Image (cartoon, grey):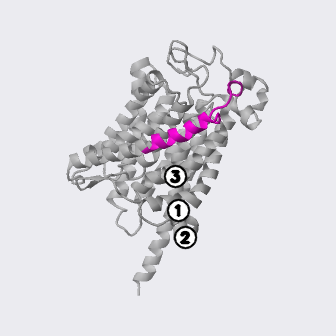
Amino acid sequence: MVLAPLQVSADALNYTWVLVVSFLIFFMHAGFAMLEAGQVRSKNVANQLTKNLLTWSVGVTVFFLIGAGVSSLVGGGGFSAAFMTSGTGWIDWLYGAVFAMTAATIVSGAVAGRAKLRAYVIYTFLLAAVIYPVVTGITWAGAYISFGGAGFTDFAGGMIVHGMGGIAGLTAAYVLGPRMGRYNEDGSVNVIPGHSLTFAVLGTLILAFGWYGFNVGTSAIIGEGFLGDQLGRVAMTTTIAMACGAMGAGLVAWMRTGKVDTLYVANGLLAGLVGITAIPHTTSWWGAFVVGGLAGIQLPLVFGFVEKTLKIDDVCAVFPVHGSAGVLGTLLYPFVAAPGVVDSVVNAFVAQVIGVVAIGAWTVIATAAVWGVLKAMGQARVTPEHEQEGLDVSEHGVETYPEFGDSVVADGGMTSENIRTDGGSKDD
């Protein structure tokens, strides 16, 4: 007679926790908005903010009507769309939706400054309806990926959410081409600094706060025995990895230039968080140092490779922050796991490789197809005149900083004062 009321109380606490976690993850959109707004030029700030607002508004609606059902269908269930459920099912849907929208909003930072708003909205629609749900369908919903008895492991979306979003952003940026003035005729790189380092760092810290919902929130289910070792482990590894990511990126910047680049430190912190997100529940304490540190170290190296070798203009560094860091952490799983977690390092590693390749290949093909069609139709990129003028005016008819009048557009143009060719940052 006592067990039933206790179970009701546990269920109530569980779903309250899931809602609180969902709200924390939703708050990450404020972080993405500030981080991206800070890294673009003043003439494109309103465009980035609008894209972040529409990512949630369009994406969450589409995920409710289509995406949740597609994920269930691909995973082997029926097309149990969210609107066909009720009560606790809607809570579960919201929890899935905030993860989906995180994957979607990552792309906006990569295509900043030149993508048409309508093109971005179309891609967001298709990502929420099909592209992301297929990824969750073959992993979390279906668990189809395995090798030698070892299944693909991704606890909170290091590869499924962030890796997928980073790869999608890189692919879209490649199809669109670089911003005007980003590269010279000889292939050398012009650095186009963002307009507010303050906004970028504020966005970073907001994202880090919300990330506890991402990782720790995924762990805690009251009454299931997870409140001890696993919950503490996830909180600990998440915190250590973000700290080591910031230090790793800052160290590389210091070794290369003699100065600690603030934006590298901020993005390195996020890369450390991405790196640990797939495996915080199994990683040893020392593994968190390894994953976070390597995720931070790879950030400036991969960013340089993308920028200078591949000639892809990834404005907000979404691939090194989310893509390569997500891949790195996912692949490190069997090597940094706590004792007794992995039966066969080889089988576990192969399963992780298969998962990364499957998710990456699907994301590249689907993203390239969507943006390729839009580009062929002349609907992917704004005109050179509109790009020079700024997307705030051409796409939205507003100026983010009207008190400066026409100088907002003029100062945002290609001048010797805000473009450097030495590979450094204006803030150095």
Residue 107 shows in this picture: yes
Of residues 158 and 27, the one nearer the viewer is 158
Instruction: Quickly name the residue at label 3.
Output: 130
Q: Residue at x 53, y 32 (%)?
A: 175
Disc 3 residue type? Val
> Which callout, 3 or 2, points to the residue nearer the camera?
3
Q: Main secondary structure of the magenta part?
A: helix
Secondary structure of the residue carrying tag 3 is helix
Contact between marks 3 and 1 (CB within 8 A): the answer is: no
**Magenta-span inclusion, residue 202:** no
Tell me which corner region of the image, top left, top right, bottom left or bottom right, holds residue 180.
top right
- Distance between the alpha carbons at the discs numbered 1 and 2: 9 Å
Q: Residue at x 54, y 13 (%)?
A: 185
Q: Position of residue 276 (x, y in %)?
A: 38, 45
Q: Quadrant where the N terminus lies?
A: bottom left
Residues in magenta? 362-388
Measured in 3D between alpha carbons, the distance from the residue under mark 3 to the one under mark 2, in whole angstroms, is 20 Å
- The residue labelled by disc 1 is 93
Tell me the residue at 50%/15% (across/down). Answer: 187
Q: Of marks 1 and 2, which one's residue comes earlier in the chain?
A: 2
Residue beneath disc 2 = 85
Q: Which residue type carries mark 2? A: Thr
Q: Residue furthest bottom?
A: 1
